[in-house]
Image (cartoon, rainbow, N blue to C red):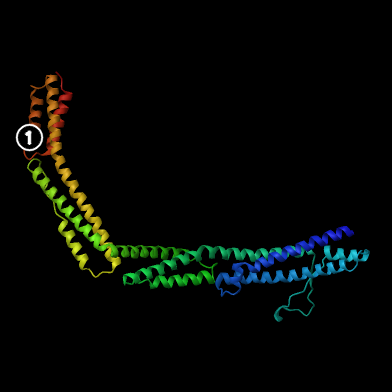
Amino acid sequence: MSREGAEHALRARADERDRISGDLLDLESHTTYRLLRGASLRGATERRWAAAQEALAGLWALNDAYRAVLRDAEQLRASRPRLGVDQLARLTELLSGPSVVLRAAAKPVEQRSLLPQADARLTLDETVTRMDAAFREVTAALNEIDAVWNAVLPRLDDAEARLRRIRELEGLLGETSDLAAQEAELKRMRAAAVEDPLGPSVGPDLDRVTRLLAGSLAEVELAIVVKDEYARRREDLVAALDRVRAAESETRLAHGSVVVKIALPPQAQPRSRVEALAGELDALDASADPWVLRAKRLSALEGETRRVADQARATAKALYGLVGRRDELRGRLGACQAMAVRKGLAEDPVTSELYERARVLLWSAPCDLTRAAEAVENYQRAISGGRR
């Protein structure tokens, strides 16, 4: 090398050494790296981290040898203001030649030979390449482990927080539920995630336990609300039952009014549900069930009460609608008769017979709506297809 080339190469290597030192310090301060150094690992993670540590030990050995060569080169450069030919040749050898000596590793006795073990000699570039490969192996292991921890540990934290919240709310209720199995599963999954994150995934089991705890928490929260609001909601339910009575009464009145006009099947006879619902409310008042169960029963009873009231009102409307349907058919029959007169079919024996059949059915009490509608349809079809 020329003097200028040697100066430039030495400065570049010094910068490279500082950068590598900074990367190694960052590695040692990495949170996952620090956790793994003192962790009790097992399974696939233990094997992967053991290989990474072996690579890291090799990296540090290479780094020590690399730095030793650079120290020799810097001392040589500092030995005199202007280097001579011999010094430049030596500096060139240190910076460009196979100057990094990697001592042969001691082997177990069963793997040894009586022949001397040769040391490896590398250039600085080759040394950096090997260090980079080892560094990448270590960081790849860290990234894989870190990815699992980042994905699983926060979810485990959330699940455990839900479990604690359930226990707190149950304390307010003065009740307890059997969640010991889920608590044990969470402990098992946390141990597996911490000690062997690269092993079998705890994801499916965690999904199942999370769903179960979410459902249990929702039930307990609802139970708290129901317990606090039970008196008010009971009063609202009593009022709702009164509305059911009124709706069922209207349905009975509608049935009584319509049944004399329209032929109804036996199953159309209204059946009251209000007393059964009131009985369920009385049973709920006297119940010694846990509030979680009582909350479910109260919500179900509220929903059923609304459904029964809506059904009763819909039934009354449908019954009155049958009378409207009869009147509509009567109107259609009159319109068809007027059409028959215009077409000169009013005296036709066939159409007259069809008209009379429909009229008798529509003005009979109770009226068979199905047969009456069919008769009107037949009369209208005869008129529409008739000829003068």
Q: Position of residue 136 (x, y in %)?
A: 66, 63
Q: Quadrant of the C terminus?
A: top left
Dot 1: few (<14), some (14–19), or many (≥20) neighbours within 10 Å?
Answer: some
Q: Nearer the viewer, residue 259 or 382?
A: 259
Assign a secondary structure to mark 1: loop
Q: Position of residue 340 (x, y in %)?
A: 13, 23
Quick check: 25 left or right of 88?
Answer: left
Q: Which residue sits furthest bottom?
A: 109
Q: Nearer the viewer, residue 255 or 237?
A: 237
* Residue drawn at the location 76% of the way across and 79% of the way down: 113
Instruction: Specify whether residue 285 is in view.
Output: yes
Q: Nearer the viewer, residue 86 or 339?
A: 86
* Residue drawn at the location 18% of the way across and 47% of the way down: 313
Exactly how many numbered labels are in the figure? 1
In the rendered structure, which amino acid carries the disc numbered 1? Trp
Quick check: 177 left or right of 266?
Answer: right
Q: Quadrant of the N terminus?
A: bottom right
* Residue drawn at the location 89% of the way across and 69% of the way down: 79
State which quadrant residue 39 falls in: bottom right
**Mark 1, residue position:** 363
Instruction: Specify whether residue 374 is in view.
Output: no
State which quadrant residue 17 falls in: bottom right
